């Protein structure tokens, strides 16, 4: 299976992202308005977001979505109850703030 990864608001994160080691396509947008989310994520299996909220109304229109990776601390911008009920995993991107959080 080839995953389709879409980063909805790349300009909000300065960190370098390592490409995944699995077959995938990748598209990124500097920013995404709420009304653009569904069009940009059509067919995507993985969404990366930093500040773009993902609510039930939006998520219900994205049947291919399997994972939402949040490029920030916390996951409060995601409707986790909807995701749990529909088998969409939610996590922070790997190694996000792995140095700064322990220092705090």
Image: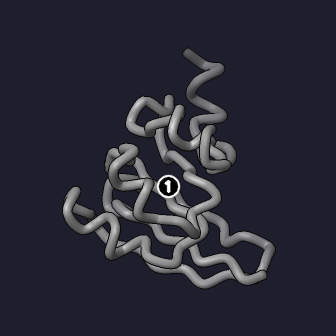
* Residue 39 versus residue 88 in the image, above or below: below
Left or right side of 88 for 81: left
The image quarter containing residue 76 is top left
Q: Position of residue 80 (x, y in %)?
A: 52, 35
Label 1: state its secondary structure: loop
Task: Name the residue at the top extreme.
Answer: 104
Q: Residue at x 65, y 34 (%)?
A: 98
- Crowding at mark 1 (Cα within 10 Å: few <14, some 14-19, many 20+): few
Q: Which residue is mark 1?
A: 15
Q: Residue at x 79, y 76 (%)?
A: 22
Q: Position of residue 88 (x, y in %)?
A: 62, 50
Left or right side of 70 for 2: right
Q: Residue at x 49, y 47 (%)?
A: 71
Left or right side of 80 for 20: right
Give the tally of numbered discs.
1
Q: Nearer the viewer, residue 60 or 34?
A: 60
Q: Residue at x 67, y 76 (%)?
A: 3
* Residue 12 versus residue 79 in the image, above or below: below
Q: Position of residue 6 (x, y in %)?
A: 48, 71
Which quadrant is the N terminus positioned in?
A: bottom right
Which quadrant is the C terminus positioned in?
A: top right
The image quarter containing residue 65 is bottom right
* Residue 93 versus residue 47 in the image, above or below: above
Q: Position of residue 103 (x, y in %)?
A: 60, 19
Q: Which colour scheme appears in the figure?
A: one colour
């Amino acid at each position: 299976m080839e995953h389709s990864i879409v980063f909805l608001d790349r300009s909000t994160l300065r960190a370098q992202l390592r490409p995944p080691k699995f077959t995938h396509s990748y598209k990124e947008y500097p920013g995404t308005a709420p009304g653009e989310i569904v069009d940009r994520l059509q067919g995507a299996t993985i969404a990366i977001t930093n500040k773009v909220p993902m609510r039930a109304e939006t998520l219900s229109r994205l049947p291919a979505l399997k994972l939402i990776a949040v490029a920030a601390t916390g996951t409060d911008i995601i409707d986790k109850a909807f995701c749990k009920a529909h088998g969409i995993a939610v996590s922070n991107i790997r190694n996000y703030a792995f140095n700064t959080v322990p220092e705090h």
